Image: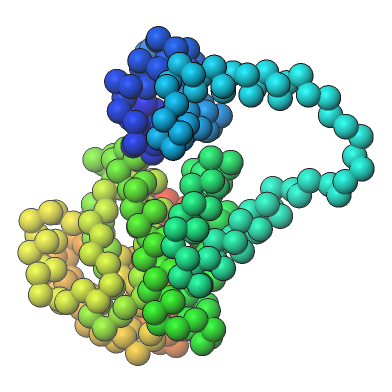
Amino acid sequence: MYSIKQVAAMLGIQAVTLRAWENRYNAVTPERTDSGYRMYTEEHVADLRWLKQQIDQHQTSISEAVRMLKEKKESRSRAVIPMPTAPPVPNAEEAYEHMTDQIYDSLYHFQGERANGLIDFGFTMYGYDSMFYHVLVPILVRVGDAWEEGRATVAQEHFMTQLISQRFYQFFHLFPIYPHLPKVLAMCPEGEHHQVGLLLFSLFMRKNGAEVLYLGANTPEEGVFPIIREQKIKLVCLSVTNSGLVDTCDQLIDRIREEFPHVRFVLGGKGFERAEHARYPEWIMPEDSGDWQSWIEREYFNE
């Protein structure tokens, strides 16, 4: 379920317009909380996205677009389901995998417009959560593996990661921030140029309600200490893919702890996972993202 503010940000439609479409044209009828706030389902979002496409791409009036939408739904409800003579419809997992393959192939061949079109279509078909966890995250993981194994060039890896990252950034501001949670600084140290894991964890923390200051890849130490002090950072997340940078991170952690004893750390990336003698093993996050929720709640949120 999404608030009107979230839907407005996702679709690029002003909240006042959404209310007008509802009141004047009965475009969609969102559910209401006990306090009277509008809450939109995935179907509502898909219908509103379709209406916006008719207006933007075909210069259709909103009244005509709503009429077309209702006719389409009525026609769909009257349709007689035929006996299965064709191959069965793919299940959700197969559909996600097919979408992942299509987007990855487009990005691999630098077809940015096609990739964005597929992503937009995926959001319409599957909604935010499903596209995020079942399509876009696996693409980022696959991109990192392809680069590491030499199946993708640096240029391909940068192009693919940048485009997916831009789509992720759109959702950063959609989640509410809970002041009681630690404020997070996320960065890769100087010399580390691959930020896929850092981005995924930062988005995970934002969805949990933590405010995240995202500095990204190849961040020099200069300027980090004033940020920690002035922004009252409580948690620093460091990510490295190169195990040769683990010692550099350990030294940085020591310097931060010396000046800010209250700061805690989250350490991630294949560099830390492969480190044979990690100085701070208790701060290394689980390799499987499926274990992040229980780990972060146990180690950082239940104090």
> Residue 261: image x %, image y %?
16, 65
Q: In this view, does 35 lie above or below 2?
A: above
> Residue 199: image x %, image y %?
37, 62
Q: Left or right: where does residue 190 sit relative to residue 299?
A: left
> Residue 213: image x %, image y %?
23, 56
> Residue 149: image x %, image y %?
53, 85
When asked about the image quadrant of residue 35, the answer is top left
Q: Which colour scheme is used?
A: rainbow
Q: Is residue 7 visible?
A: yes
What residue appears at the point 34 percent right and 40 percent down from the top-left corner? 174
Q: Is residue 241 above or below residue 30?
A: below
Q: How many labels does the image show?
A: 0
What residue appears at the point 74 percent right and 48 percent down from the top-left corner? 91
- Residue in the foreground of this view, choosing between 229 and 299: 229
Q: In this view, does 252 lie above or below 140?
A: below
Q: Left or right: where does residue 290 sit relative to residue 174?
A: right
What residue appears at the point 53 percent right and 65 percent down from the top-left corner? 106
What residue appears at the point 67 percent right and 18 percent down from the top-left corner? 74
